[in-house]
Image (cartoon, grey):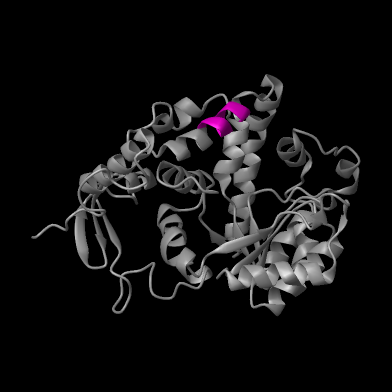
Amino acid sequence: MTSAAAGSARSARRAKENQSATPDEWDAEAARQAAAGMTYFKLYTDLTAGEVALGVKAARSHGLIPIAHLNAVSWSRALALGVEQFAHALPTSPDLLEPAARKRFVVGPDLMTLWWELAELDGPLISDLVASLAEARAKVDLTLVVNEMVYFGDEWESRLPELAGPADYFHPAQLEALEAAYAAFRGAPAPQLVRGKAVWPKVLAFARMLHDAGVDLMIGTDGAGGVGLRHELENHVEAGIPEWEVLRMATSGNADLIGLGDTGRIAPGFEADIVFLHSDPIADVGNVQDVAFVLTNGKLHRHEDLLDVAREIAFAAKSGVGDGPSAGPATPEPRKE
């Protein structure tokens, strides 16, 4: 496992008994994840404040970093309880809504839309949250593409045309997961999609608020690499963050924030993992996908050669042969020049 590996405590409730796990059970789960080589301990969604506190204590007792994706407990409260990093642009606790708006908030299938409709970005609760995140040096991985997928579920073929007719190097397992997700998003009621598109600028404004306040932002995609990563970079630029800063966040920034001290920048003694592009990503951050060569471990590979390996893996998986290439080396031969 890498130093960025994360386990999760998706629910601290015992399903059969519908009751909170005991401190010993929390401790045992954290111990299991630490033994598996995890670095992070992720606390999920509808935990209570008491459960978050137990999770933080268990994580730290085993040298794990407590991170969270929460709905019921606010980011402000979780920060006070010791959570060090937050995932997704979903600070969707009613406790972060001003009192009048809080009365109108109802948890339902439109949670990700309704909360943003009601949130007051310039109100005291959100303002205090942003200031607290910056002061505590908490880390935030917004994964804006998650919100975008929900709000634009009927437009994905135009927003990400690469996924409308998937390339032949996509692994079938990845395609299956993507198609299931897109089917769910496309199935959202039309009025909800209209509302989602209306709050999208507000989500981007929140991202810009965090950046301008000095909050440590990371670039992530919730699992969709490749074109998903490129699109996440574009989302951050759309939020008003300069291209160079977005590129820094995705490279040396990410590496520094997750403790990878020997990668993310070109410097003596660092990993020789470098992507060479045909086009300037400062002119258009989407040019990160216009790859010419990849240098890894000091060996230079053509982009097309790497795609050929991916095609072989995908073909073998589709054919039921296995997960590896059907023939030839597992990695392309490096260029000689």
- Residue 201 in picture, x, y percent from top left: 61, 39
**Residue range of the region highlighted in magenta in the rendering:** 179-184
- Residue 194 in picture, x, y percent from top left: 66, 25
Is there any visible trace of residue 334 in the rendered image? yes
Farthest left residue? Answer: 337
Q: Which quadrant would residue 131 be assigned to in this image?
A: bottom right
Q: Residue at x 71, y 67 (%)?
A: 29
Figure check: 232 above or below 131: above
Horizontal side, residue 18 vs residue 134: left or right: right
Farthest front residue? Answer: 321
Closest to the observer: 126 or 36? 36
Horizontal side, residue 70 vs residue 318: left or right: right
Query: In which quadrant will I find the C terminus?
Result: bottom left
**Residue 160 within the magenta-colored segment of the rendering:** no
- Residue 265 in picture, x, y percent from top left: 35, 68
Horizontal side, residue 282 vs residue 222: left or right: left
Q: Residue at x 82, y 55 (%)?
A: 13
Q: Residue at x 48, y 46 (%)?
A: 232
Dominant SS in magenta: helix
Q: Which quadrant would residue 298 be assigned to in this image?
A: bottom left
Figure check: 76 above or below 146: below
- Residue 219 in picture, x, y percent from top left: 51, 55
Closest to the observer: 75 or 333? 333
Q: Which quadrant would residue 263 be assigned to in this image?
A: bottom left
Is there any visible trace of residue 82 in the rendered image? no
**Residue 183 within the magenta-colored segment of the rendering:** yes
